[in-house]
Amino acid sequence: MDRLSILQTFVTVAETGSFTTAAERLGLSRAMTSRHVQTLEDRLGVRLLQRTTRRVSPTEAGLGYLERARRLLADFEEAETEVRGERAAPRGTLRVNAPVSFGRTHLAGALPGFLARYPDLTVEVTVNDRVVDLIEEGFDVAIRIGRLGDSSLVARRLGTVGTWMAASPGYLARRGAPSTPGDLTGHDCIGYAYSADVTRLVHADGREASVRFDGPLTANNGDLVTEAAAGGAGIVMQPDFILAPYLADGRLVPVLPDWSRQDLGVYAVHHQSRHVAAKVRAFVDHLVERFRDSPWSIPPPAVRPPTR
């Protein structure tokens, strides 16, 4: 049997949750549809679909294989389009991963224009703050903030973020404001789970200092730690796109405003390939245009925190 046809059959059954519906879409008999999937499972030596009398659903192994099968089919379709000399218009499903806070505050606003420009595309966005494996987890593009370590990926810079320290006026009135990075050891610093144990700070005049930024509270989401800081839990260190509204309305005020982490890059990363998928190229180009001037950036905090 044609392996591509078998893959397409598996994907269609998994997506519809029904052998009968998949058979109708593919123009096959139900028996042939079932045979295709059984042949694939026999060759792999693993069950990909869980069958019940009411519904068919992917097993854990099937979910992982489904993402790879979708990608293979999309790549094959695009390769055929290029060989025929046709213009590869973006189409299909684009799977995107992004940090939670950046996804909510900035990526979300970039999506309506992109979808309007490319009506044949469907976009699936997953947000989390950990570094995902694009291939293993089936993503086409990921937004990453920081220093890139995986050289197997193609990265395109979208902008820059600054990272500052801040605390609520109430916390600083109660505990006093640190005047040097060393003073942070006597304060409740709210930790971010994906930050290094030791943070390198840079002064406006170029001096550097290394500090352990930790305390009684740590979380894996920037919005959560920032909101906790606004409630008086301690000093937070977060990117400007998270801190900006809190600094603007006074819920937080700057701490050690002359010190910050080194600016971090915002990147769109994707797999290396001789032929970048049209949907990936179109999406990255759209983000570069949308974020050209780092619209989330704020100037270094100029307001000094209150002292006890």
Image: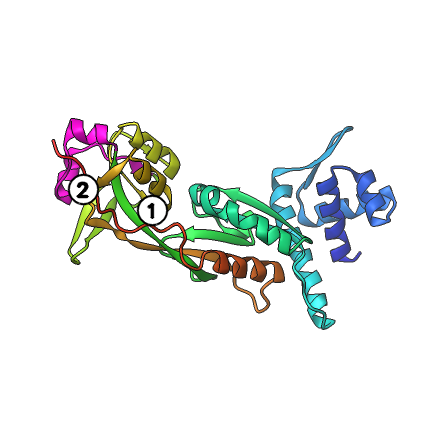
Residue 50 within the segment the image draws in magenta: no
Distance between the alpha carbons at the discs numbered 1 and 2:
17 Å
**In the drawing, what numbered circle is on residue 240?**
1
Numbered circles on residues, count? 2
Query: What residue appears at the point 20 percent right and 46 percent down from the top-left corner?
Result: 257
Q: Position of 14 compared to 178: left or right?
A: right
- Secondary element under disc 1, as helix, strand or loop, is helix
Query: What residue appears at the point 41 percent right and 52 percent down from the top-left corner?
Result: 295
Residue 1's place in the image compared with 52, above or below, is: below
Spot occupied by residue 194 in the image (x, y as percentages of width and height): 35, 43
Q: Position of 52 compared to 172: left or right?
A: right
Image quarter hosting the C terminus: top left
Mark 2 crowd level (few <14, some 14–19, many ≥20, 10 Å Cα): few
Q: Amino acid at mark 1?
A: Asp
Question: Toward the viewer: 1 or 242?
Answer: 242
| Rendered image quadrant of residue 277 | bottom right
Q: Position of 293 compared to 272: left or right?
A: left
Query: What residue appears at the point 69 percent right and 69 percent down from the top-left corner?
Result: 82
Q: Amino acid at mark 2?
A: Arg
Spot occupied by residue 64 in the image (x, y as percentages of width and height): 60, 45
- Tell me the residue that label 2 is attached to: 304
Query: What residue appears at the point 32 percent right and 40 percent down from the top-left corner?
Result: 248
> Magenta segment range?
168-192
Mark 1 crowd level (few <14, some 14–19, many ≥20, 10 Å Cα): many
Residue 169 within the segment the image draws in magenta: yes
